[in-house]
């Protein structure tokens, strides 16, 4: 069925009914077909209603008039329209008319041998855009004033609909500061392109879970990926086919919490030591004194006038007890001196310090024909006197608990060192705050009698002896002093051994 075409009158009525101003301007050419001007050959009703510099000329009016001032004001429009005629490419722009207090959008396109100009009032659209900008600016101001990092992300899915990545939609100032990225390097970028280790950290799986299930997630974690290293509290909430991430840097709180935990541990350890000391003060330390007193009473009552062999024996026993008490008191005082480290720390050259210790022990080293090797040792910050006590006790222990017998090998002691990070010593209970700290690992290994592995912690306790006094002299305080010195220097110590196969002491001191 053929549709009846509208008449010219009907077509004119149709154009007059449009809310847009429609004008057709014919190109006026010379004999060389060059455009000299444009003339309004058609203007709909709406265009004739628009005044004050938009369309107030009637049909037949030339764009470039005879008036020089008007000609200058329309010259730019003339050049634009000539360009549209030449390239057949439409030209569009918006402008504000102050007389009408309104925004308009004008489009010019080639139609026949002329230009079709269509002008639309877009004031309501502009007001909506302005209101939207104001609302966006207000929201951004609120978000940027937040101390928490806030980011919004849109899901990126493959052809099968699987969520494979996210795109950053927004990021407030706090979030940019915490991740050390300007907002321009985030918005519009893929999450895994900016933070490729997000999958390895486990965060990506939480994000996917929130989007796919709608369940919010909140976790605390140590984020040590993508060049970042901080403790963070992360919350996720679904938003459309994406999510909003809110996160807070809680590194300071974690450090304070760790310090508090360390203080509690130190206090517990101190209390335990005080309890042990009180027990010893009331028992072990008084035992030699009671013997001295008892033998003294016997001498006074039975051998006052004549000291025979028995009396001499009693005196010898008294002297032995007194000597043991003297050693015990000396060790107890040594332990009490290292309970805290209050001296100013200084650079300590461990090479020289160990050489001095070996010089002090030269006699016993020679007597036992011991072979001691020492690798070049580092310089550390610490208390020289306490560190000297540490090495003296370890080396003395290695010499004391060497194997005896005509066929036993000569004592061998090896002191070695290397640098590493706390996280590399998984066998030690390294605190979270020290995992990325650089340490000097100093190892003291011997070929002595060793000890049972389950005794590894007990040997560092005060007055804990693995052998009776008749086998090996000592008070059981030496290794307790070693541990206390290590603790004072914010280090770590571990002992490993197999019975009759020697012992190895590993010491971590901050680099």
Image (tube, rainbow, N blue to C red):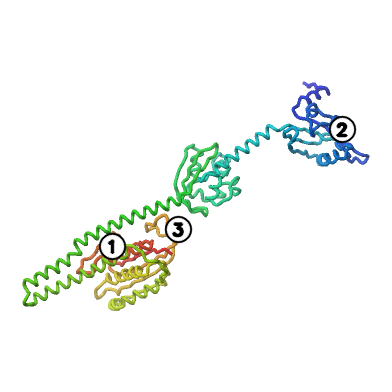
Label 2 SS: loop
Q: Determine crowd level at label 3: few under 14, some 14-19, many 20+ residues with C-alpha closer than 10 A.
A: some
The answer to whether 313 appears left or right of 374 in the picture is left
Q: Which mark is residue 61?
A: 2
Mark 2 / mark 3, whichever is N-terminal: 2
Residue 432 to residue 50: above or below: below
Q: Quadrant of residue 329?
A: bottom left
Mark 1 / mark 3, whichever is N-terminal: 3
Decide which of 463, 493 is in the foreground and name it.
463
Q: Determine crowd level at label 1: few under 14, some 14-19, many 20+ residues with C-alpha closer than 10 A.
A: many
Q: Determine crowd level at label 2: few under 14, some 14-19, many 20+ residues with C-alpha closer than 10 A.
A: some
Mark 3 lies on residue: 436
Residue located at (89% from left, 39% from top): 36
The answer to whether 494 appears left or right of 187 in the picture is left
Q: Quadrant of residue 402?
A: bottom left
Quarter of the figure with the C terminus: bottom left
Query: Mark 2 and mark 3: span between their CA atoms?
Result: 81 Å
Q: Which mark is residue 459?
A: 1
Report if residue 165 is visible in the image.
no
Query: Which percent across, then down, holds residue 247?
Result: 49, 45
Residue 6 to residue 228: above or below: above
């Amino acid at each position: 069925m053929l549709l009846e075409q509208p008449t010219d009158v009907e077509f004119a009525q149709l154009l007059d009914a449009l809310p847009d101003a429609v004008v057709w301007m014919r190109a006026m050419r010379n004999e060389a077909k060059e455009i000299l001007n444009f003339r309004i050959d058609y203007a709909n009703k709406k265009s004739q209603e628009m005044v004050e510099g938009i369309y107030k000329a009637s049909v037949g009016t030339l764009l470039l008039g005879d008036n020089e001032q008007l000609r200058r004001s329309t010259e730019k429009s003339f050049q634009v329209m000539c360009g549209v005629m030449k390239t057949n490419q439409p030209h569009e722009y918006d402008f504000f008319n102050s007389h009408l207090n309104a925004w308009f959008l004008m489009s010019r396109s080639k139609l026949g041998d002329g230009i079709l100009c269509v002008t639309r009032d877009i004031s309501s659209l502009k007001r909506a855009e302005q209101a939207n900008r104001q609302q966006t600016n207000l929201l951004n101001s609120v978000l940027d004033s937040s101390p928490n990092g806030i980011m919004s992300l849109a899901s990126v899915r493959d052809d099968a609909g699987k969520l494979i990545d996210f795109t950053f939609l927004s990021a407030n100032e706090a979030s940019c500061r915490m991740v050390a990225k300007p907002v321009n390097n985030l918005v519009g970028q893929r999450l895994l392109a900016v933070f490729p280790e997000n999958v390895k950290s486990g965060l990506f799986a939480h994000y996917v879970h929130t989007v796919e299930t709608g369940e919010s997630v909140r976790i605390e974690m140590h984020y040590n990926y993508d060049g970042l290293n901080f403790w963070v509290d992360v919350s996720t909430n679904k938003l459309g086919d994406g999510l909003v991430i809110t996160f807070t840097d809680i590194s300071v709180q974690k450090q304070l919490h760790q310090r508090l935990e360390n203080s509690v541990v130190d206090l517990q350890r101190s209390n335990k030591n005080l309890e042990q000391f009180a027990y010893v003060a009331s028992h072990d330390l008084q035992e030699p004194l009671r013997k001295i007193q008892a033998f003294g009473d016997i001498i006074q009552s039975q051998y006052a006038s004549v000291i025979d062999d028995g009396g001499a024996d009693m005196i010898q026993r008294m002297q032995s007890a007194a000597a043991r008490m003297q050693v015990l008191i000396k060790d107890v005082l040594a332990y009490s001196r290292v309970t805290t480290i209050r001296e100013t720390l200084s650079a300590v050259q461990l090479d020289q310090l160990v050489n001095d210790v070996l010089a002090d022990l030269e006699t016993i080293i020679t007597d036992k024909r011991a072979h001691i090797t020492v690798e070049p040792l580092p310089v550390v910050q610490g208390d020289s006197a306490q560190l000297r006590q540490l090495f003296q006790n370890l080396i003395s222990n290695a010499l004391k608990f060497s194997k005896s017998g005509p066929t036993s090998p000569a004592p061998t002691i090896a002191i070695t060192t290397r640098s590493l990070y706390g996280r590399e010593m998984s066998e030690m209970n390294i605190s979270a705050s020290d995992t990325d700290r650089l340490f000097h690992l100093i190892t003291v290994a011997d070929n002595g009698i060793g000890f049972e592995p389950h005794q590894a912690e007990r040997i560092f306790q005060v007055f804990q002896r693995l052998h009776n006094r008749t086998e090996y002299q000592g008070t059981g305080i030496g290794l307790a002093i070693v541990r206390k010195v290590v603790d004072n220097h914010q280090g770590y110590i571990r002992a490993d051994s197999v019975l009759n196969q020697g012992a190895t002491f590993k010491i971590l001191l901050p680099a």
